[in-house]
Image (cartoon, coloured by chain):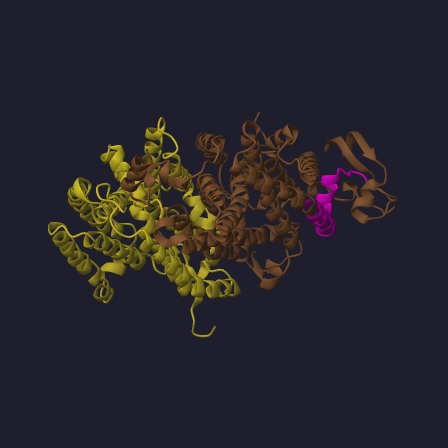
Chain colours: A brown, B yellow
């Protein structure tokens, strides 16, 4: 029954599972860190209390999400060695330094200033505290820079050579770092993180406005989030389109899988909207397609020829169904985000931004859409790279550790159990935090949790609480 | 790069990162290990608060140790990680539990006990796994070609269990002396008493590991006990004795800061001892630092970053510790 579930497949399942969990939290915390920096800057600039209330409200949520991102990230950094040791040996000299730079320039910056950001406002004063918030936000962006550089190099490797031991070595570091797909991937991911956060912030705002549309904090967060959706959703679709053209140039087989093009089209390829990719038969079943539109989108000409998977040896095909469908899920989410942004803009122009229950309900329903899009997009790009870890150069089967299947299987089961325990609890706590509206005098992780008051002194919190009564 | 032996420099950098990790995460893992001995919620709140603002930075050194190893010595990383598969997975899962406990236990009253157990259990498991991994490396690893060639359970031996237990005792001592430094009153008194017991246990553990190590390989024996090496290695046990004497005195005098820093000195000496045993192997008896080294341009590329950034990181880390300096005191507090 488990034929084919060899150590490599299990290691892939483990990587996909742990990565899917992990990617959700950075996607959220990149956006949230920037949002927090903006809120604190607005507070320092205007002195309006609503901004510091919102800052403290989202800070607690950030702390929980960031903690989960950190612990699931440590797992990722060691998984390269445990499950993909052959990959580490061969590719380590190139992507190892990129990841080391991520640790040196980003992780330490985030972690070093996080404590001050979470607990230090009263100890260092508002200006130094803002500096800490800014450093954490910048850290998350630097982290995205390096990890996407490493990932992009695996997709579109340049600037390297291969030595006598079969290791990749860098010949030109600038070409390695700024490889052809990197700029597109970085922009696409950072915009995705901002959108993801905006959709959560907007949903939380809308949720509280549904009950009381005069709440000051939720109005501010809702309005800011809707601006973000209005401006960034179209930008993201544009960035995605450019990224797609880049992929067509450098990873054409991935595009064939994303588009479901099993067969070549000499005079104009259709756009297959939906269908059932039949990998073993090498054809698309039940396809619903628009003639010529595929060539129009990808080549900007209706009659441009498009090569299909039939021009590629079968052993180099990625899993078409997963790539095809995850891509459609991502695009679908993007279109919904565009619709939300447009709807909110329409309401805003009419001066009715806070009057439409329908808009609120739409915004609440869109809360998870960013996460779904990020996951689906990641699955598209990573699955579309298969069967290679380094595109065209190093096969996935040649990347795995010399491990027996039972070892990988038992660790996979352990990860599944632990992650579900830990992250279910985390999500419950996050939802609980979001279910309460921000209130005037919101004091971040201090007043409502006496034990953590004044940074690290329990008594001050108890006193403050006593005084408040 | 004439005259500069890059792999030696990188060996020191990786060793430094791992040591900073041991120093910094050691005491906060130790607090988790001691958690069951402090059953009262109030004490536990103080204990967690004493590291809540800094634990995340502490753990980042572990990521640098792993990431740096992959970047500078990819072959060593590729051999060691599969060889230490089970302890590594256990360590990671332990760190997951204890890491989230820092945030989660404040968000719930009903389930606080569960997160207390997660914090304590995760810390204990992670420490035990680290100690066992250390023992497994010291006892040697089967290598064939460019890959690990041993079995799934090779890491588990009486010696690796011994190093695992020794590290648990050592981290617990770091945690106890940290509490001496950061707390007051009854909590500090208990930390003092614990420090005595744990120090005795740690001396026993250092003795046992030191006595067992020479039997693992001829190299270790020759390194420590033959002339002229012995002239160079003898200062290590002498220094251990001297630091121990100072530590006993500082505990007897109930000093605040000395016990913690002297315990760190004990760790540094033990760590230097490990370095003396292993050098120049990075995978003992199989792969030297030169064989495992990444190509020169990878090591040079990272060296620039390390030279500029490590001092910077140490600077702002020190600042963060300075911001949260002083006692965590539930009685008088800062208000």
Magenta region, residue range:
A236-263
Residue A60 visible in the shown view: yes
Question: Which residue is pictured at 46% across the width and 57% down the height?
Answer: A104
Residue B257: image location, x then y, percent: 21, 54
Query: Within the magenta stretch, is there residue A244?
Result: yes
Query: Within the magenta stretch, is there residue A343?
Result: no
Residue A16: image location, x then y, percent: 56, 38
Up the image or down, A417 lies above or below B305; here it is above
Residue B55: image location, x then y, percent: 36, 47
Question: Which residue is pictured at 34% across the width and 30% down the height?
Answer: B112
Camera-side residue of A31 and A353: A353
Camera-side residue of A81 and B106: B106
How many numbered marks does the figure carry? 0
Residue A60: image location, x then y, percent: 44, 40
Residue B153 visible in the shown view: no
On screen, residue A390 versus residue A289, left or right, reads left
Camera-side residue of B335 and A158: B335
Camera-side residue of A273 and A344: A344
On screen, residue B292 versus residue A390, left or right, reads left
């Amino acid at each position: 029954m488990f034929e084919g579930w060899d150590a490599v497949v299990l290691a892939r399942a483990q990587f996909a599972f742990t990565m899917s969990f992990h990617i959700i939290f950075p996607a959220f915390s990149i956006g949230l860190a920037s949002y927090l920096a903006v809120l604190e800057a607005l507070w320092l600039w205007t002195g309006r209390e609503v901004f510091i209330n919102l800052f403290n409200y989202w800070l607690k949520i950030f702390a929980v999400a960031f903690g989960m991102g950190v612990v699931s990230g440590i797992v990722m950094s060691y998984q390269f060695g445990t499950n993909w040791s052959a990959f580490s040996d061969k590719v380590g000299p190139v992507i190892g330094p990129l990841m080391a730079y991520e640790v040196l320039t980003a992780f330490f910056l985030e972690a070093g200033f996080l404590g001050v950001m979470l607990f230090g406002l009263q100890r260092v004063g508002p200006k130094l505290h803002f500096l800490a918030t800014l450093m954490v936000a910048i850290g998350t962006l630097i982290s995205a820079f390096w990890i996407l550089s490493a990932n992009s190099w695996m997709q579109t490797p340049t600037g390297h050579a291969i030595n006598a031991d079969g290791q990749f070595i860098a010949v030109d570091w600038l070409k390695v770092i700024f490889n052809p797909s990197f700029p597109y991937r970085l922009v696409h991911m950072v915009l995705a993180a901002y959108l993801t956060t905006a959709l959560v912030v907007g949903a939380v705002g809308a949720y509280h406005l549904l009950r009381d549309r005069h709440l000051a904090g939720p109005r501010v967060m809702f309005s800011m989030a809707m601006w973000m959706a209005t401006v960034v959703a179209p930008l993201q679709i544009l960035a995605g389109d450019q990224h797609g053209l880049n992929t067509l140039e450098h990873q054409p087989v991935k595009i064939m899988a994303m588009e479901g093009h099993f067969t070549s089209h000499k005079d104009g390829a259709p756009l297959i909207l939906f269908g059932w990719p039949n990998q073993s038969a090498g054809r698309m079943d039940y396809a619903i397609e628009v003639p010529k539109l595929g060539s129009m989108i990808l080549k900007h000409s209706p009659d441009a020829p498009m090569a299909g998977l039939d021009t590629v040896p079968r052993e180099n095909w990625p899993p078409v169904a997963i790539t095809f469908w995850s891509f459609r899920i991502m695009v679908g989410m993007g279109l919904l985000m565009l619709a939300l942004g447009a709807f909110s803009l329409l309401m805003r122009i009419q001066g009715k931004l806070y009057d439409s229950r329908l808009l609120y309900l739409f915004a609440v329903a869109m809360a998870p859409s960013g996460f779904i899009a990020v996951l689906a997009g990641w699955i598209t790009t990573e699955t579309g790279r298969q069967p290679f870890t380094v595109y065209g150069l190093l096969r996935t089967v040649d990347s795995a550790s010399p491990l027996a299947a039972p070892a990988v299987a038992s660790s996979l089961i352990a990860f599944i159990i632990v992650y579900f325990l830990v992250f279910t609890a985390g999500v419950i706590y996050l939802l609980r935090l979001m279910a309460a509206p921000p209130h005037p005098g919101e004091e971040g992780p201090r007043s409502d949790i006496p034990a953590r008051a004044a940074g690290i002194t329990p008594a001050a919190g108890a006193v403050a609480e006593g005084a408040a009564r | 790069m004439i005259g500069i032996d890059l792999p030696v420099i990188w060996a020191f950098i990786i060793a430094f990162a791992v040591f900073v990790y041991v120093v910094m995460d050691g005491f906060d893992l130790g607090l988790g290990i001691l958690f069951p001995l402090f059953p009262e919620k109030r004490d536990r709140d103080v204990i967690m608060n004493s590291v809540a603002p800094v634990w995340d930075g502490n753990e980042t050194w572990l990521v640098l140790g792993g990431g740096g190893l992959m970047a500078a010595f990819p072959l060593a990383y590729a051999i060691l990680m599969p060889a230490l598969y089970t302890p590594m997975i256990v360590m990671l899962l332990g760190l997951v539990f204890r890491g989230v406990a820092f945030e989660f236990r404040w968000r719930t009253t009903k389930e606080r006990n569960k997160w207390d157990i997660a914090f304590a259990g995760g810390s204990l498991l992670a420490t035990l796994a680290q100690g066992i991994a250390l023992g497994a490396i010291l006892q040697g690893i089967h290598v064939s070609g460019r890959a690990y060639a041993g079995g799934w359970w090779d890491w588990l031996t009486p010696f690796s269990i011994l190093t695992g237990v020794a590290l648990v005792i050592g981290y617990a001592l770091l945690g106890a002396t940290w509490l001496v430094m950061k707390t007051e009153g009854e909590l500090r008194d208990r930390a003092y008493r614990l420090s005595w017991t744990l120090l005795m246990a740690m001396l026993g553990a250092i003795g046992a590991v030191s006595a067992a190590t020479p039997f693992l390989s001829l190299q270790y024996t020759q390194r420590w006990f033959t002339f002229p090496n012995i002239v160079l290695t003898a200062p290590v046990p002498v220094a251990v004795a001297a630091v121990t004497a100072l530590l006993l005195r500082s505990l007897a005098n109930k000093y605040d800061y000395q016990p913690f820093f002297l315990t760190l000195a004990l760790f540094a000496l033990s760590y230097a001892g490990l370095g003396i045993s292993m050098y120049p192997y990075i995978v003992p008896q199989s792969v030297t630092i030169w064989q495992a080294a990444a190509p020169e341009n990878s090591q040079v590329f990272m060296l620039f970053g390390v030279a500029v950034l490590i001092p910077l990181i140490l600077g702002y880390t020190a600042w963060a510790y300075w911001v949260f300096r002083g006692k965590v005191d539930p009685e008088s507090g800062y208000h």
